[in-house]
Image (tube, grey):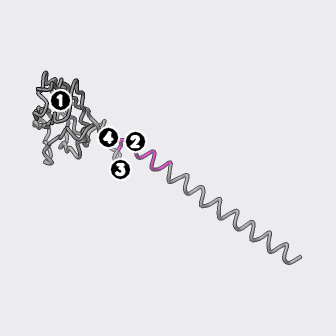
């Protein structure tokens, strides 16, 4: 009889312990999700009003005809039209033949910046459509730049 009671007590204790740990996990997941979806800062003010905003003059460029083997480049210009310093944290090209270059320095509100995109046409032929995805401290945090053209064999 003592063994049965002891087993029941151990089973009850394990069940309680598991339930407590499981509810903590759910609360953590909800907290993290709420923090991502809610732009309010910790002090209760609306931080979205203080975000930088990137405004490109153009988000696409057509090179026209490119002779195979040439490297061509285009500089995309932008303005920080927001209310905080703009920081570009990364720029990823859709292909290894395309290289984005940008300043790591913050761009103050009202100031301009630029992103140079270099395309190497070596080994390419026909129409090209390449993109560069910019990651910045803006809302939304990604921006897409596109270059197009046609590579001809000499």
The quadrant holding residue 137 is top left
Residue at 17% x, 29% y is: 56
The quadrant holding residue 49 is top left
Residue 41 or residue 150, whichever sits in front:
150
How far is the residue under mark 1 from the one under mark 4?
Answer: 25 Å
Residue 93 or residue 3, whichever sits in front:
93
Q: Quick one: label 1, few (<14), some, or many (20+) residues within 10 Å?
A: some
Secondary structure beneath label 1 = strand
Establish if 21 lies above or below 95: below
Residue for badge 1: 56
Residue for badge 3: 42
Q: Quadrant of the N terminus?
A: bottom right
N-terminal of the pair, mark 2 or mark 4, is 2
- Count of numbered marks: 4
How far is the residue under mark 3 from the one under mark 2?
Answer: 10 Å
Which residue is farthest bottom?
Answer: 2
Establish if 144 lies above or below 64: below
Q: Quadrant of the C terminus?
A: top left
Which residue is farthest top?
Answer: 64
Q: Are marks 3 and 1 in contact (CB under 8 Å)?
A: no
Give the x, y percent position of residue 115. 14, 37
What is the magenta range?
Answer: 30-40
Residue at 35% x, 43% y is: 40
């Amino acid at each position: 009889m003592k063994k049965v009671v002891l087993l029941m007590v151990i089973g009850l204790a394990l069940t309680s312990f598991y339930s407590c740990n499981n509810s903590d996990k759910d609360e953590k997941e909800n907290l993290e999700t709420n923090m991502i979806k809610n732009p309010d800062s910790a002090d209760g003010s609306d931080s979205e009003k203080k975000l930088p905003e990137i405004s490109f003059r153009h988000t696409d460029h057509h090179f026209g005809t490119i002779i195979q083997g040439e490297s061509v480049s285009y500089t995309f210009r932008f303005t920080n039209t927001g209310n905080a310093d703009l920081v570009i944290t990364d720029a990823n090209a859709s292909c290894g033949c395309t290289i984005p270059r940008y300043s790591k320095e913050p761009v103050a509100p009202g100031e301009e910046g630029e992103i140079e995109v270099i395309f190497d046409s070596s080994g390419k032929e026909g129409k090209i459509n390449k993109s560069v995805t910019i990651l910045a401290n803006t809302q939304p945090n990604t921006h897409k730049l596109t270059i197009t053209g046609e590579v001809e064999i000499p």
